[in-house]
Amino acid sequence: MQTLFRALAELGEKLEATKKRLLMLDLVSDFLTKLEVEELEPAVSMILARPFPKWSQRTLDVSWATLSEIIKRISGIEWSVFDEAFSRSGDVGSATMVVFERSKVRRQAALFEKALTLLEVRRSFEAIADAVGYGSREKKERLIEALLSQASSLEVKYLMKIFIGDMRTGFHEGLMEQAISKAFKIPLRLVQQTSMVTGDIGQVASVAKTEGAEGLAKIGFKVFRPVNLMLAQMADTVGEALKEHGGKTAFEYKYDGARVQIHKLGEQVKIFSRRLTDVTDSLPETVQVVEQNIKAREVILEGEVIAVDAHGFPIPFQHLMRRFKRVHSVEEVAGEIPIELYLFDMLYLNGKSLISASYLERRRFLAETAGGIPLSAQVVTDSVNEAEGFLRKAMDAGHEGLMAKRLDSPYTPGIRGKRWLKVKPILEPLDLAIVAAEYGYGRRHGWLSDYYLAARDSETGEFFPVGKTFKGLTDAEIIEMTRRLKDLALRKEHGRVVVLPKIVVEVAYNEIQTSPRYECGMALRFARITRIREDKTPQEADTIQRVKEIYEKQFLKKGRYRTG
Protein backbone atom coordinates (compact mmCIF):
# COMPACT_ATOMS: atom_id res chain seq x y z
CA MET A 1 0.00 0.00 0.00
CA GLN A 2 1.40 3.38 -1.00
CA THR A 3 2.28 5.87 1.73
CA LEU A 4 0.08 8.94 1.93
CA PHE A 5 1.63 12.38 1.70
CA ARG A 6 -0.35 13.21 4.82
CA ALA A 7 1.95 10.90 6.78
CA LEU A 8 4.94 13.01 5.77
CA ALA A 9 3.05 16.19 6.73
CA GLU A 10 2.22 14.72 10.14
CA LEU A 11 5.87 13.80 10.60
CA GLY A 12 6.76 17.41 9.81
CA GLU A 13 4.38 18.60 12.53
CA LYS A 14 6.04 16.36 15.09
CA LEU A 15 9.52 17.52 14.07
CA GLU A 16 8.42 21.14 14.24
CA ALA A 17 7.10 20.63 17.76
CA THR A 18 10.38 19.42 19.28
CA LYS A 19 14.00 20.49 19.55
CA LYS A 20 15.14 17.15 20.98
CA ARG A 21 17.50 15.59 18.46
CA LEU A 22 17.11 12.04 19.73
CA LEU A 23 13.35 12.27 19.41
CA MET A 24 13.72 13.69 15.89
CA LEU A 25 15.97 10.78 14.92
CA ASP A 26 13.51 8.25 16.35
CA LEU A 27 10.59 9.84 14.48
CA VAL A 28 12.33 9.97 11.09
CA SER A 29 14.04 6.56 11.32
CA ASP A 30 10.72 4.93 12.24
CA PHE A 31 9.03 6.69 9.30
CA LEU A 32 11.71 5.54 6.85
CA THR A 33 11.47 1.88 7.87
CA LYS A 34 7.79 1.81 6.89
CA LEU A 35 8.31 3.13 3.34
CA GLU A 36 8.49 1.10 0.15
CA VAL A 37 11.83 1.23 -1.67
CA GLU A 38 10.56 3.50 -4.46
CA GLU A 39 9.19 5.92 -1.85
CA LEU A 40 12.43 6.37 0.09
CA GLU A 41 14.29 8.86 -2.11
CA PRO A 42 11.22 11.09 -2.70
CA ALA A 43 10.41 11.04 1.02
CA VAL A 44 13.98 11.82 2.11
CA SER A 45 14.17 14.67 -0.41
CA MET A 46 10.83 16.13 0.68
CA ILE A 47 11.67 15.94 4.40
CA LEU A 48 14.69 18.09 3.51
CA ALA A 49 12.44 20.51 1.53
CA ARG A 50 13.62 19.30 -1.90
CA PRO A 51 11.19 18.35 -4.66
CA PHE A 52 13.92 16.28 -6.38
CA PRO A 53 17.17 14.56 -5.41
CA LYS A 54 20.06 16.94 -4.88
CA TRP A 55 21.92 15.88 -8.04
CA SER A 56 18.90 16.34 -10.31
CA GLN A 57 18.97 19.18 -12.83
CA ARG A 58 15.17 19.46 -12.66
CA THR A 59 13.80 22.66 -11.12
CA LEU A 60 10.22 23.67 -10.41
CA ASP A 61 10.96 27.20 -11.67
CA VAL A 62 7.90 28.71 -9.98
CA SER A 63 8.02 32.15 -8.38
CA TRP A 64 6.36 33.10 -5.12
CA ALA A 65 4.29 35.65 -7.07
CA THR A 66 2.80 32.77 -9.07
CA LEU A 67 2.22 30.62 -5.98
CA SER A 68 0.50 33.43 -4.09
CA GLU A 69 -1.86 34.11 -7.02
CA ILE A 70 -2.82 30.42 -7.12
CA ILE A 71 -3.44 30.39 -3.36
CA LYS A 72 -5.73 33.42 -3.68
CA ARG A 73 -7.59 31.82 -6.57
CA ILE A 74 -8.15 28.47 -4.84
CA SER A 75 -9.03 29.85 -1.42
CA GLY A 76 -11.13 32.82 -2.51
CA ILE A 77 -10.01 34.62 0.63
CA GLU A 78 -8.65 38.12 1.33
CA TRP A 79 -4.84 38.20 1.27
CA SER A 80 -4.82 40.10 4.55
CA VAL A 81 -5.51 36.73 6.21
CA PHE A 82 -2.17 35.45 4.90
CA ASP A 83 -0.37 38.66 5.94
CA GLU A 84 -1.75 38.42 9.48
CA ALA A 85 -0.86 34.71 9.80
CA PHE A 86 2.62 35.25 8.38
CA SER A 87 3.22 38.12 10.83
CA ARG A 88 2.53 35.72 13.69
CA SER A 89 4.45 32.66 12.48
CA GLY A 90 7.06 33.98 10.04
CA ASP A 91 6.48 30.77 8.10
CA VAL A 92 5.00 30.62 4.59
CA GLY A 93 3.66 27.08 4.98
CA SER A 94 1.90 27.81 8.27
CA ALA A 95 0.38 31.02 6.91
CA THR A 96 -0.90 29.21 3.80
CA MET A 97 -2.47 26.52 6.01
CA VAL A 98 -4.38 29.22 7.91
CA VAL A 99 -5.66 30.64 4.63
CA PHE A 100 -6.91 27.22 3.51
CA GLU A 101 -8.49 26.46 6.89
CA ARG A 102 -10.51 29.67 6.77
CA SER A 103 -11.60 29.24 3.17
CA LYS A 104 -15.23 28.25 2.68
CA VAL A 105 -14.40 27.26 -0.90
CA ARG A 106 -11.73 24.86 0.39
CA ARG A 107 -13.97 23.38 3.08
CA GLN A 108 -16.55 22.52 0.42
CA ALA A 109 -13.91 21.08 -1.91
CA ALA A 110 -12.47 18.98 0.94
CA LEU A 111 -15.53 16.72 0.74
CA PHE A 112 -14.31 15.49 -2.65
CA GLU A 113 -10.58 15.29 -1.92
CA LYS A 114 -8.68 12.21 -3.05
CA ALA A 115 -5.89 11.22 -0.69
CA LEU A 116 -2.48 12.16 -2.13
CA THR A 117 0.37 9.67 -2.00
CA LEU A 118 4.08 10.48 -1.79
CA LEU A 119 4.67 9.18 -5.31
CA GLU A 120 1.76 11.17 -6.73
CA VAL A 121 3.26 14.34 -5.25
CA ARG A 122 6.64 13.49 -6.80
CA ARG A 123 4.99 12.89 -10.19
CA SER A 124 3.24 16.26 -9.90
CA PHE A 125 6.57 17.96 -9.17
CA GLU A 126 8.11 16.23 -12.20
CA ALA A 127 5.27 17.39 -14.44
CA ILE A 128 5.64 20.98 -13.18
CA ALA A 129 9.40 20.92 -13.79
CA ASP A 130 8.97 19.39 -17.25
CA ALA A 131 6.57 22.14 -18.37
CA VAL A 132 8.90 24.30 -20.46
CA GLY A 133 8.73 26.43 -23.59
CA TYR A 134 5.70 28.16 -25.06
CA GLY A 135 2.71 28.19 -22.71
CA SER A 136 4.73 26.65 -19.87
CA ARG A 137 3.70 29.21 -17.27
CA GLU A 138 0.01 28.53 -17.77
CA LYS A 139 0.62 24.78 -17.73
CA LYS A 140 2.63 25.02 -14.51
CA GLU A 141 -0.16 27.04 -12.90
CA ARG A 142 -2.78 24.45 -13.86
CA LEU A 143 -0.64 21.63 -12.46
CA ILE A 144 0.05 23.46 -9.19
CA GLU A 145 -3.60 24.39 -8.81
CA ALA A 146 -4.60 20.76 -9.37
CA LEU A 147 -2.09 19.57 -6.77
CA LEU A 148 -3.08 22.10 -4.10
CA SER A 149 -6.77 21.54 -4.78
CA GLN A 150 -6.38 17.85 -3.91
CA ALA A 151 -4.49 18.56 -0.69
CA SER A 152 -5.77 19.07 2.83
CA SER A 153 -4.80 22.24 4.69
CA LEU A 154 -2.04 20.40 6.54
CA GLU A 155 -0.70 18.91 3.32
CA VAL A 156 -0.74 22.33 1.66
CA LYS A 157 1.46 23.62 4.48
CA TYR A 158 4.17 21.11 3.62
CA LEU A 159 3.72 21.34 -0.13
CA MET A 160 4.39 25.07 0.16
CA LYS A 161 7.49 24.43 2.28
CA ILE A 162 8.84 22.16 -0.45
CA PHE A 163 7.94 24.67 -3.18
CA ILE A 164 9.95 27.41 -1.48
CA GLY A 165 12.70 25.06 -0.24
CA ASP A 166 12.44 25.87 3.48
CA MET A 167 11.08 23.20 5.83
CA ARG A 168 11.80 25.04 9.13
CA THR A 169 11.78 21.87 11.23
CA GLY A 170 15.45 21.96 12.21
CA PHE A 171 15.95 18.52 10.66
CA HIS A 172 18.96 18.86 8.34
CA GLU A 173 21.01 16.54 6.14
CA GLY A 174 23.42 15.53 8.91
CA LEU A 175 20.50 14.31 11.03
CA MET A 176 19.06 12.50 8.01
CA GLU A 177 22.33 10.54 7.70
CA GLN A 178 21.96 9.53 11.35
CA ALA A 179 18.30 8.58 10.84
CA ILE A 180 19.17 6.33 7.88
CA SER A 181 21.96 4.72 9.89
CA LYS A 182 19.51 4.01 12.71
CA ALA A 183 16.64 2.88 10.46
CA PHE A 184 18.65 0.32 8.48
CA LYS A 185 21.28 -0.57 11.11
CA ILE A 186 24.26 0.59 9.06
CA PRO A 187 27.38 2.27 10.51
CA LEU A 188 27.00 6.04 10.38
CA ARG A 189 30.47 6.49 8.90
CA LEU A 190 29.53 4.35 5.88
CA VAL A 191 26.29 6.29 5.37
CA GLN A 192 28.22 9.57 5.50
CA GLN A 193 30.90 8.35 3.08
CA THR A 194 28.34 7.11 0.58
CA SER A 195 26.38 10.35 0.87
CA MET A 196 29.55 12.31 0.07
CA VAL A 197 30.30 10.21 -3.00
CA THR A 198 26.77 10.12 -4.44
CA GLY A 199 25.94 13.73 -3.63
CA ASP A 200 22.46 12.68 -2.53
CA ILE A 201 21.27 11.16 0.72
CA GLY A 202 18.01 9.92 -0.85
CA GLN A 203 19.78 7.34 -3.02
CA VAL A 204 21.74 6.23 0.05
CA ALA A 205 18.48 5.47 1.86
CA SER A 206 17.18 3.33 -1.02
CA VAL A 207 20.36 1.26 -1.28
CA ALA A 208 20.58 0.96 2.51
CA LYS A 209 17.12 -0.61 2.62
CA THR A 210 17.61 -3.03 -0.30
CA GLU A 211 21.31 -3.95 -0.13
CA GLY A 212 22.48 -2.89 3.33
CA ALA A 213 26.07 -2.01 4.20
CA GLU A 214 27.44 -4.27 1.46
CA GLY A 215 25.51 -2.37 -1.20
CA LEU A 216 26.58 1.03 0.12
CA ALA A 217 30.23 -0.04 0.14
CA LYS A 218 30.04 -0.72 -3.62
CA ILE A 219 28.74 2.73 -4.55
CA GLY A 220 31.23 5.05 -6.20
CA PHE A 221 31.26 8.23 -8.23
CA LYS A 222 29.03 8.44 -11.25
CA VAL A 223 30.29 10.76 -13.98
CA PHE A 224 27.77 13.52 -14.84
CA ARG A 225 26.21 13.27 -11.38
CA PRO A 226 27.76 16.24 -9.51
CA VAL A 227 28.82 15.87 -5.88
CA ASN A 228 29.04 18.37 -3.05
CA LEU A 229 32.16 20.51 -2.90
CA MET A 230 34.72 20.47 -0.10
CA LEU A 231 34.48 23.71 1.86
CA ALA A 232 36.91 25.81 3.87
CA GLN A 233 36.99 27.78 7.09
CA MET A 234 38.65 31.15 7.63
CA ALA A 235 42.11 31.94 8.97
CA ASP A 236 43.10 35.49 9.78
CA THR A 237 46.77 35.13 8.81
CA VAL A 238 49.12 32.79 6.98
CA GLY A 239 50.78 32.17 10.34
CA GLU A 240 47.50 30.91 11.79
CA ALA A 241 47.08 28.59 8.80
CA LEU A 242 50.60 27.20 9.18
CA LYS A 243 50.04 26.56 12.88
CA GLU A 244 46.70 24.85 12.26
CA HIS A 245 48.29 22.58 9.63
CA GLY A 246 51.21 21.49 11.76
CA GLY A 247 53.81 24.00 10.64
CA LYS A 248 53.81 23.30 6.89
CA THR A 249 51.07 23.62 4.29
CA ALA A 250 50.26 24.27 0.64
CA PHE A 251 49.15 27.79 -0.23
CA GLU A 252 47.23 28.41 -3.47
CA TYR A 253 45.89 31.59 -5.02
CA LYS A 254 42.26 32.24 -4.06
CA TYR A 255 40.84 33.47 -7.33
CA ASP A 256 37.89 35.88 -7.51
CA GLY A 257 35.98 33.58 -9.79
CA ALA A 258 33.40 30.83 -9.91
CA ARG A 259 34.13 27.33 -8.73
CA VAL A 260 33.30 24.60 -11.25
CA GLN A 261 33.18 20.81 -11.20
CA ILE A 262 34.16 19.29 -14.54
CA HIS A 263 33.03 15.81 -15.59
CA LYS A 264 34.37 13.98 -18.65
CA LEU A 265 33.43 10.57 -20.03
CA GLY A 266 34.93 9.65 -23.39
CA GLU A 267 34.40 12.66 -25.64
CA GLN A 268 31.56 14.18 -23.60
CA VAL A 269 32.22 17.01 -21.14
CA LYS A 270 29.84 18.62 -18.66
CA ILE A 271 30.47 21.51 -16.30
CA PHE A 272 28.59 22.10 -13.05
CA SER A 273 28.48 25.26 -10.96
CA ARG A 274 29.00 25.59 -7.23
CA ARG A 275 25.24 25.04 -6.90
CA LEU A 276 25.63 21.79 -8.89
CA THR A 277 23.71 23.29 -11.82
CA ASP A 278 24.68 22.24 -15.34
CA VAL A 279 26.34 25.32 -16.93
CA THR A 280 27.99 23.50 -19.84
CA ASP A 281 26.22 25.51 -22.54
CA SER A 282 27.25 28.82 -20.94
CA LEU A 283 30.99 28.02 -20.99
CA PRO A 284 31.80 26.63 -24.46
CA GLU A 285 35.47 27.71 -24.39
CA THR A 286 35.97 25.90 -21.07
CA VAL A 287 34.47 22.75 -22.59
CA GLN A 288 36.79 23.15 -25.56
CA VAL A 289 39.94 23.56 -23.46
CA VAL A 290 39.02 20.41 -21.48
CA GLU A 291 38.39 18.45 -24.68
CA GLN A 292 41.74 19.55 -26.10
CA ASN A 293 43.84 18.90 -23.00
CA ILE A 294 42.32 16.16 -20.84
CA LYS A 295 43.11 12.80 -22.41
CA ALA A 296 41.80 10.63 -19.55
CA ARG A 297 38.69 8.71 -20.53
CA GLU A 298 36.82 9.21 -17.26
CA VAL A 299 37.54 12.04 -14.86
CA ILE A 300 36.03 14.49 -12.36
CA LEU A 301 38.05 17.67 -11.87
CA GLU A 302 37.60 20.83 -9.90
CA GLY A 303 38.69 24.30 -10.86
CA GLU A 304 38.01 28.00 -10.88
CA VAL A 305 36.79 30.03 -13.83
CA ILE A 306 37.71 33.72 -13.77
CA ALA A 307 36.72 36.57 -16.07
CA VAL A 308 39.64 38.60 -17.44
CA ASP A 309 40.25 41.81 -19.35
CA ALA A 310 42.24 42.20 -22.58
CA HIS A 311 45.50 42.14 -20.58
CA GLY A 312 44.61 38.99 -18.63
CA PHE A 313 43.82 40.74 -15.34
CA PRO A 314 40.79 39.46 -13.40
CA ILE A 315 37.67 41.59 -13.60
CA PRO A 316 34.85 41.77 -11.00
CA PHE A 317 32.83 38.70 -10.14
CA GLN A 318 29.47 40.11 -11.28
CA HIS A 319 30.67 40.20 -14.88
CA LEU A 320 31.53 36.51 -14.69
CA MET A 321 28.02 35.76 -13.39
CA ARG A 322 26.64 37.18 -16.64
CA ARG A 323 28.36 34.28 -18.38
CA PHE A 324 26.77 31.71 -16.10
CA LYS A 325 23.29 33.10 -16.67
CA ARG A 326 23.63 33.24 -20.45
CA VAL A 327 22.24 30.38 -22.51
CA HIS A 328 21.50 32.32 -25.71
CA SER A 329 23.97 34.34 -27.82
CA VAL A 330 26.80 32.84 -25.76
CA GLU A 331 29.43 33.57 -28.42
CA GLU A 332 28.58 37.27 -28.35
CA VAL A 333 29.00 37.60 -24.57
CA ALA A 334 32.08 35.34 -24.66
CA GLY A 335 33.76 37.99 -26.81
CA GLU A 336 32.87 40.67 -24.27
CA ILE A 337 33.81 38.62 -21.18
CA PRO A 338 36.71 36.21 -21.85
CA ILE A 339 37.28 33.56 -19.19
CA GLU A 340 40.21 31.46 -18.01
CA LEU A 341 40.20 28.11 -16.24
CA TYR A 342 42.56 27.09 -13.42
CA LEU A 343 42.40 23.53 -12.07
CA PHE A 344 43.07 22.81 -8.41
CA ASP A 345 41.79 19.31 -7.56
CA MET A 346 40.84 15.89 -8.92
CA LEU A 347 38.20 13.64 -7.37
CA TYR A 348 38.02 10.71 -9.77
CA LEU A 349 40.18 9.18 -12.52
CA ASN A 350 39.40 6.25 -14.82
CA GLY A 351 37.16 4.36 -12.41
CA LYS A 352 39.09 5.17 -9.24
CA SER A 353 37.99 7.54 -6.49
CA LEU A 354 40.76 9.84 -5.29
CA ILE A 355 39.00 11.51 -2.37
CA SER A 356 40.78 9.34 0.21
CA ALA A 357 44.17 10.22 -1.28
CA SER A 358 46.15 13.06 0.28
CA TYR A 359 46.14 16.57 -1.13
CA LEU A 360 49.70 16.10 -2.43
CA GLU A 361 48.78 12.84 -4.20
CA ARG A 362 45.72 14.39 -5.83
CA ARG A 363 47.77 17.39 -6.91
CA ARG A 364 50.32 15.06 -8.53
CA PHE A 365 47.59 13.16 -10.42
CA LEU A 366 46.11 16.49 -11.47
CA ALA A 367 49.44 17.78 -12.83
CA GLU A 368 49.88 14.57 -14.84
CA THR A 369 46.36 14.83 -16.30
CA ALA A 370 45.84 18.56 -16.90
CA GLY A 371 47.79 18.84 -20.14
CA GLY A 372 48.11 22.52 -21.01
CA ILE A 373 45.45 23.73 -18.55
CA PRO A 374 47.14 25.80 -15.82
CA LEU A 375 46.89 24.67 -12.21
CA SER A 376 46.21 27.15 -9.42
CA ALA A 377 49.41 28.95 -8.43
CA GLN A 378 50.90 27.10 -5.44
CA VAL A 379 53.72 27.15 -2.92
CA VAL A 380 54.37 24.49 -0.26
CA THR A 381 56.17 26.07 2.67
CA ASP A 382 56.83 26.17 6.40
CA SER A 383 57.95 29.83 6.28
CA VAL A 384 55.66 32.66 7.37
CA ASN A 385 57.79 35.13 5.39
CA GLU A 386 57.54 33.09 2.19
CA ALA A 387 53.78 32.66 2.66
CA GLU A 388 53.27 36.39 3.26
CA GLY A 389 55.27 37.16 0.12
CA PHE A 390 53.08 34.72 -1.83
CA LEU A 391 49.99 36.43 -0.42
CA ARG A 392 51.24 39.86 -1.57
CA LYS A 393 51.92 38.42 -5.01
CA ALA A 394 48.35 37.06 -5.20
CA MET A 395 46.88 40.41 -4.17
CA ASP A 396 49.08 42.32 -6.64
CA ALA A 397 47.76 40.03 -9.41
CA GLY A 398 44.17 41.06 -8.53
CA HIS A 399 43.12 37.94 -6.64
CA GLU A 400 41.24 37.61 -3.32
CA GLY A 401 43.92 36.01 -1.15
CA LEU A 402 45.10 32.47 -0.51
CA MET A 403 43.80 29.00 0.22
CA ALA A 404 45.82 26.92 2.69
CA LYS A 405 45.48 23.16 2.19
CA ARG A 406 46.79 20.61 4.65
CA LEU A 407 49.25 18.36 2.83
CA ASP A 408 47.77 15.05 4.05
CA SER A 409 44.12 16.09 3.77
CA PRO A 410 41.62 13.88 1.92
CA TYR A 411 38.85 15.49 -0.14
CA THR A 412 35.67 15.58 1.94
CA PRO A 413 32.66 16.55 -0.23
CA GLY A 414 30.16 18.80 1.51
CA ILE A 415 32.26 19.17 4.66
CA ARG A 416 33.48 22.55 5.93
CA GLY A 417 36.58 21.96 8.02
CA LYS A 418 40.01 23.28 8.89
CA ARG A 419 41.86 21.05 6.43
CA TRP A 420 41.25 23.86 3.95
CA LEU A 421 41.51 27.46 5.15
CA LYS A 422 40.80 30.78 3.43
CA VAL A 423 43.23 33.61 4.12
CA LYS A 424 42.10 37.12 3.16
CA PRO A 425 43.97 40.29 4.15
CA ILE A 426 40.77 42.26 4.77
CA LEU A 427 37.95 41.88 7.28
CA GLU A 428 36.08 38.77 6.23
CA PRO A 429 32.98 39.59 4.18
CA LEU A 430 29.75 37.75 4.94
CA ASP A 431 27.36 36.06 2.53
CA LEU A 432 23.89 37.09 3.72
CA ALA A 433 20.33 36.67 2.46
CA ILE A 434 18.04 39.59 1.69
CA VAL A 435 14.88 39.11 3.79
CA ALA A 436 13.20 42.48 3.26
CA ALA A 437 13.65 45.73 1.35
CA GLU A 438 12.40 49.30 1.41
CA TYR A 439 11.77 51.76 -1.39
CA GLY A 440 14.37 54.50 -1.75
CA TYR A 441 14.06 58.25 -1.90
CA GLY A 442 14.63 60.81 -4.66
CA ARG A 443 15.56 59.16 -7.93
CA ARG A 444 15.35 55.77 -6.18
CA HIS A 445 11.77 56.25 -5.00
CA GLY A 446 10.39 53.56 -7.31
CA TRP A 447 13.11 51.03 -6.54
CA LEU A 448 13.57 48.57 -3.69
CA SER A 449 17.03 49.82 -2.80
CA ASP A 450 17.44 49.53 0.99
CA TYR A 451 18.04 45.91 1.94
CA TYR A 452 17.68 43.97 5.20
CA LEU A 453 20.52 41.44 5.45
CA ALA A 454 20.17 38.22 7.42
CA ALA A 455 22.31 35.31 8.59
CA ARG A 456 21.02 31.74 8.89
CA ASP A 457 20.67 29.84 12.17
CA SER A 458 22.58 26.59 11.59
CA GLU A 459 20.25 24.73 13.97
CA THR A 460 16.80 25.83 12.77
CA GLY A 461 17.42 27.29 9.31
CA GLU A 462 15.69 30.52 10.35
CA PHE A 463 17.14 33.82 9.10
CA PHE A 464 17.99 36.63 11.53
CA PRO A 465 18.60 40.20 10.29
CA VAL A 466 22.00 41.62 11.21
CA GLY A 467 21.81 44.93 9.38
CA LYS A 468 20.57 46.86 6.39
CA THR A 469 22.21 48.80 3.58
CA PHE A 470 21.48 50.84 0.48
CA LYS A 471 25.09 50.83 -0.68
CA GLY A 472 26.99 48.81 -3.23
CA LEU A 473 24.71 48.08 -6.18
CA THR A 474 24.64 49.97 -9.47
CA ASP A 475 21.38 51.48 -10.74
CA ALA A 476 21.04 48.63 -13.25
CA GLU A 477 21.52 46.07 -10.48
CA ILE A 478 18.98 47.84 -8.24
CA ILE A 479 16.39 47.82 -11.02
CA GLU A 480 16.93 44.08 -11.61
CA MET A 481 16.95 43.43 -7.84
CA THR A 482 13.63 45.28 -7.50
CA ARG A 483 12.08 43.02 -10.13
CA ARG A 484 13.37 39.88 -8.43
CA LEU A 485 12.32 40.95 -4.94
CA LYS A 486 8.79 41.79 -6.09
CA ASP A 487 8.48 38.20 -7.31
CA LEU A 488 9.61 37.01 -3.86
CA ALA A 489 7.40 39.42 -1.87
CA LEU A 490 5.47 37.86 1.01
CA ARG A 491 3.82 40.98 2.40
CA LYS A 492 4.08 44.77 2.41
CA GLU A 493 4.11 47.00 5.46
CA HIS A 494 4.66 50.77 5.52
CA GLY A 495 7.01 50.89 2.54
CA ARG A 496 8.85 47.71 3.52
CA VAL A 497 8.49 44.52 1.52
CA VAL A 498 9.18 41.23 3.33
CA VAL A 499 10.56 38.64 0.90
CA LEU A 500 11.52 34.99 0.77
CA PRO A 501 15.23 34.65 1.65
CA LYS A 502 16.34 33.47 -1.80
CA ILE A 503 18.92 36.06 -2.88
CA VAL A 504 22.41 35.92 -1.36
CA VAL A 505 24.78 38.89 -1.42
CA GLU A 506 28.34 39.34 -0.25
CA VAL A 507 28.54 42.08 2.35
CA ALA A 508 31.54 44.08 3.55
CA TYR A 509 31.40 46.00 6.87
CA ASN A 510 33.66 47.82 9.30
CA GLU A 511 32.84 45.82 12.41
CA ILE A 512 30.11 43.89 14.21
CA GLN A 513 28.57 45.63 17.20
CA THR A 514 25.88 44.92 19.77
CA SER A 515 22.43 46.16 18.83
CA PRO A 516 19.06 46.03 20.63
CA ARG A 517 17.43 46.73 17.28
CA TYR A 518 17.82 43.17 16.04
CA GLU A 519 16.65 39.97 17.70
CA CYS A 520 20.10 38.38 17.40
CA GLY A 521 21.60 41.28 19.40
CA MET A 522 24.26 42.11 16.78
CA ALA A 523 24.49 44.46 13.80
CA LEU A 524 26.96 45.15 11.01
CA ARG A 525 28.47 48.64 11.08
CA PHE A 526 28.68 50.43 7.70
CA ALA A 527 27.45 47.41 5.74
CA ARG A 528 27.73 47.54 1.94
CA ILE A 529 27.01 44.96 -0.75
CA THR A 530 30.12 44.02 -2.72
CA ARG A 531 28.54 41.51 -5.08
CA ILE A 532 25.46 39.38 -5.72
CA ARG A 533 26.27 35.72 -5.04
CA GLU A 534 24.31 34.02 -7.81
CA ASP A 535 26.52 30.98 -7.23
CA LYS A 536 25.31 30.45 -3.65
CA THR A 537 22.04 29.09 -2.31
CA PRO A 538 20.37 30.50 0.83
CA GLN A 539 21.48 27.34 2.64
CA GLU A 540 25.08 28.40 1.93
CA ALA A 541 24.63 31.83 3.51
CA ASP A 542 26.77 32.53 6.55
CA THR A 543 25.30 31.50 9.87
CA ILE A 544 24.38 33.61 12.86
CA GLN A 545 26.84 31.43 14.78
CA ARG A 546 29.61 32.57 12.40
CA VAL A 547 28.61 36.22 12.88
CA LYS A 548 28.84 35.68 16.65
CA GLU A 549 32.28 34.08 16.22
CA ILE A 550 33.58 37.08 14.24
CA TYR A 551 32.04 39.43 16.81
CA GLU A 552 33.88 37.65 19.64
CA LYS A 553 37.15 37.54 17.69
CA GLN A 554 37.14 41.36 17.51
CA PHE A 555 37.87 41.47 21.24
CA LEU A 556 41.17 39.70 20.86
CA LYS A 557 42.55 43.08 19.84
CA LYS A 558 40.15 45.56 21.45
CA GLY A 559 38.42 45.99 24.77
CA ARG A 560 34.75 45.61 25.55
CA TYR A 561 32.55 48.42 26.74
CA ARG A 562 30.88 47.37 29.96
CA THR A 563 28.09 49.21 31.72
CA GLY A 564 27.68 49.44 35.48
Image (cartoon, grey):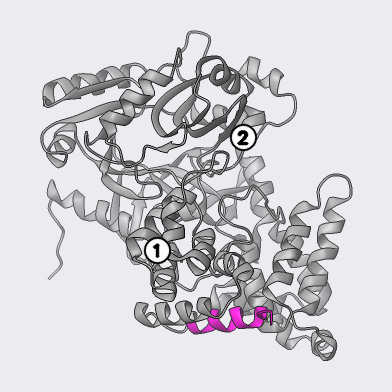
Find numbered disc 1 in the image and state the secondary structure of the residue it sits on.
helix
Earlier in the chain: of badge 1 and badge 2, it is 1
Dominant secondary structure of the residues highlighted in magenta in the image: helix
- Residue 461 vs 274, above or below: the answer is below
Q: Position of residue 468 (x, y in %)?
A: 46, 53
Q: Position of residue 163 (x, y in %)?
A: 65, 64
The residue at which mark 1 appears reads as 174
> Which of the 4 quarters of the picture holds residue 328?
top right
The residue at which mark 2 appears reads as 279
Check the picture and name the quadrant holding the C terminus: bottom left
Give left or right: position of 510 versus 119: left
Which residue appears at 54% of the width and 67% of the height?
44
- Residue 477 vs 22, above or below: the answer is above
Check the picture and name the quadrant holding the N terminus: bottom right
> Which of the 4 quarters of the picture holds residue 53?
bottom right
Find numbered disc 2 in the image and state the secondary structure of the residue it sits on.
loop
Q: Which residues are magenta?
A: 1-14
Q: Position of residue 2 (x, y in %)?
A: 68, 79
- Residue 111 vs 28, above or below: the answer is below
Q: Residues within 10 Å of mark 2 (few under 14, many from 20)?
A: some
Q: Residues within 10 Å of mark 1 (few under 14, many from 20)?
A: few
> What amino acid is labelled 1 in the image?
Gly
* C-alpha gap between disc 1 and disc 2: 28 Å
Q: How many marks?
A: 2
In magenta segment, residue 2: yes
Which residue appears at 61% of the width and 60% of the height?
497
In front: 171, or 42? Answer: 42
In front: 209, or 455? Answer: 209
> What amino acid is labelled 2 in the image?
Val
Q: Position of residue 400 (x, y in %)?
A: 36, 28
Give left or right: position of 402 versus 228: left
- Residue 374 vs 449, above or below: the answer is above
